[in-house]
Image (spheres, rainbow, N blue to C red):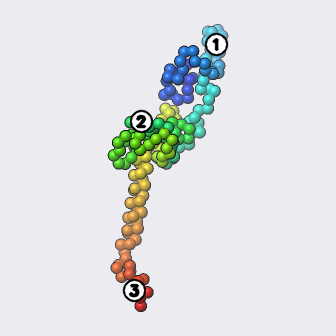
Amino acid sequence: LHKNEFSWNPNDNFENYVKIGDPITLSIIQLEPKKERIALSKKSLEDNPWKNVTVKRGDIVKAKVTAVSKEGLKVSVQGVEGEIPFNELSNEKIGKPEDYFAAGDEVQAIIIEVSKDTWVLKLSIRRVLEKAERASYEQYLENDDKNQNQTIGDLFSKDLKSKK
């Protein structure tokens, strides 16, 4: 069993998953009788989890937290594992991530990097918060511009007319 045929994830170290003597189910993918070689595969028995991933950079998604560490969060999006680094957890200074997040939590995050070839999925909660703040501020400015053209008389004209 060649390590490339163990898992679809090129970053997996199959030595961490399989020990000598462990039973595993494999398929034969190549026979070479003259060389007395058999090529085996575990991944051919499984679907590639990245096959159905449709997210792209800039998409805002719901991610399920699978693990919390001092480096950040491990999350699941569309069946694949991603990460939210510590510096992307919040737009405010936070202490330990485990004080704010737990496995099983759902968070809203934006995709900042996605690569099906290297199995990299990085997300950011901080950038979603910044985007929401920016939208709120722009809405405030838009409303403020509308109100700047009014005079005090305009503001109180309804009240003055009703008193007459």
In this view of the protein, which residue sits in the foreground, 76 or 145? 76
Q: Mark 2 and mark 3 in contact? Answer it, CB < 8 Å.
A: no
Q: CA distance from mark 1 to mark 2?
A: 46 Å
Evaluate whether residue 145 shows in this view.
yes
Q: Any mark on residue 32, and which?
A: 1
In this view of the protein, which residue sits in the foreground, 153 or 145? 153
Q: CA distance from mark 2 to mark 3?
A: 62 Å
Q: How many marks?
A: 3
> Badge 1 local density, few (<14 within 10 Å), some, or many (20+)?
few
Residue at left offset 47%, top offset 36%:
67
Q: Quadrant of the C terminus?
A: bottom left
> Badge 2 local density, few (<14 within 10 Å), some, or many (20+)?
some
| Mark sitting earlier along the chain (2/3) | 2
Foreground disc of the pair 1, 2:
2
As drawn, the residue found furthest toward the front would be 99
| Mark sitting earlier along the chain (3/1) | 1
- The residue beneath circle 2 is 69
Specify whether 151 is left or right of 64.
left
At numbered mark 1, what does the secondary structure look like: helix, strand or loop? strand
Foreground disc of the pair 2, 3:
2
As drawn, the residue found furthest toward the bottom would be 164
Residue at left offset 37%, top offset 68%:
144
Foreground disc of the pair 3, 1:
3
